[in-house]
Image: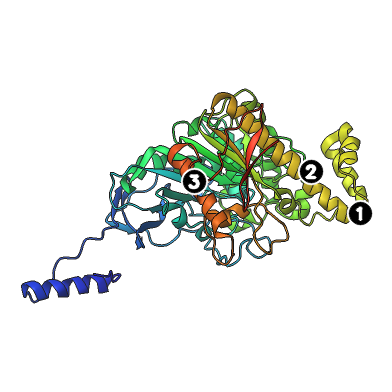
Amino acid sequence: MQRIHGKGYILAACLIVAGLVLISGCTQQVQDSTIVKIDAGSVSGINQDGIRVYLGIPFAAPPVRDLRWRAPAPVIPWEGVKAATEYGATCPQAQKGSEPSLPGAPALNVSEDCLYLNVWTPVQNASAGLPVMVFFYGGGFTGVEGSMPMYNGTTLAEKGVIVVTTNYRLGSLGFLAHPDLDRESPHNASGNYGILDQQAALKWVHDNVAAFGGDPSRVTIFGQSAGAESVYIHLVSPGSRGLFSQAIVESGPFWANGAIINATHPKDYAEQFGIQYAQSLGCSGPDAIVCMRNLTPDSLINATPSSQSEFWSTHTVMFEPNVDGWVLPDTLDNLYLNHQEDAVPLIVGNNANDGTTLSADANMSVAEYRSFLTSRFGTKADAVFARYPANSTAQVQLQLAQIMENADFIDSVKFAAGSMSDISPDTYMYRYSYIIPGQPEGAFHGSELVLLFRIPGISTDPAVADNVVDLWTRFAKTGNPNGGMEITWPNYMRETGQYLNINTTPSVSAV
């Protein structure tokens, strides 16, 4: 019988029963096959062509009022069956006055009560033991690239994996560091609440994914941009140990002091900015945090520096992870240099035109460019200018993109891949160079997500899209992405520097 949703489904079942046993009424409701019991209660989902979908499952208590700027608290249990059929709210983010970065993105439902995740599972029972893929979105830790509905896990789940996407706090609500918040913390740390949210989601997966047919010992974390930097952090964060078994890093910032992008802040720098930020909102003295907890989320988020001009003047996002000594014990540079990361199978790479996307609309004159290089490279500025010369604003734009591409992405990917390959042979490096038809930015920052999630409204080569999905899901299943291409993606080794070039025709190159 074809399923008829809601009351119509129950009525149809009752009519069949009535016809068979000649009863005048039906008192039993047909059991919903999507109902799953998890630690906080039961949830029901959506049957979608062989995939069960659960949207908006809470994994922590709402981080509001006194829970604002605290580690995520345990989720509040509920009675009965919670309908997990709609996405939870997106975490508050600054309004940047631009259209969504992906076509067709709906208006966001925004609320500070936003700690929800979503599950796509291709199984109907809890004994399948399928691998799990947990995705962290990008957006510079200040906003979501596109929106949560864009990251639809159906395509990946159809390949036999369980997919989880999760929210985490953004901007000042997710990354405000302040000495008064340190004093509230048993770890004398503040500012990395968005990363703590991700860890809480991973703990939820560890504790609950078996009920959806998943294997909590086979969890692959993957993310893009800020989400990829988050993966770098989870690989070295003590609080993430044992919560995943594999990782995929897609175009993630890495260096503490990059050529253009600073991935993290020192603790004292982040706290000093936090004090200044609080003062700008009229909150200072011993009650500064109480004062800010009484402000609306909009007033806090919209005071977050996020404009392009401020990005170029400060060279960094102001609210982002900091080296707090707890969530992040040291800079990524030092931790990976000393092989402090988990020795797990890893895919790490970047897109051929990441820099073009992220340096867009810099609009620097040549004089401003020279000054910028001096501020970033000091005594090496002349040598950098000689390598990346420019005599017009248009050329400056091109050279900034190339500097960012080479130093902030390619060099950091090589460094991370080299470090991991020293301790784990199952390390794979890639460069994604496929250009979606009609895209002037080339293989732009985040364009691989269009293929991974089959984002609607954008036409791509189905063979390339299938290959990317196959590579990611095969890796999630086995720790090795090979098996579906005519060529072999070699393990990364410092000596050979080989990586997979993902394009219409995949090929192996060397750095």
The C terminus: image quadrant? top right
Which numbered disc, 2 or 1, marks the residue that appears first in the sequence? 1
The foreground one among 235 and 343 is 343
Quarter occupied by the N terminus:
bottom left
Label annotation for residue 484: 3
Residue 482 — which label? Answer: none
Q: Residues within 10 Å of mark 1 (few under 14, many from 20)?
A: few
Q: Are marks 1 and 3 in contact (CB under 8 Å)?
A: no
Secondary structure of the residue carrying tag 1 is loop
Q: Amino acid at mark 2?
A: Ile
Quote the CA–CA distance across marks 2 and 1: 16 Å
Percent across and percent down for residue 134 are 47, 45
Q: Residue 453 at x, y = what percent?
A: 52, 56
Q: Find disc 2 in the rendering and name its residue.
A: 403
Question: Is 500 above or below relative to 48?
Answer: above
**Label 3 – label 2 distance at C-alpha:** 35 Å
Badge 2 crowding class, 10 Å Cα cut-off, few under 14, some 14 to 19, many 20 or more, is: many
Q: What's the residue type where badge 1 is placed?
A: Ser
**Which quadrant holds residue 45?**
bottom left
Q: Which residue is mark 1?
A: 392
- Residue sitting at 65 percent across and 53 percent down? 434
Mark 3 vs 2: CB contact within 8 A:
no
Indicate left or right for 70 with 431 as reference: left
- The kind of secondary structure element at disc 2 is helix
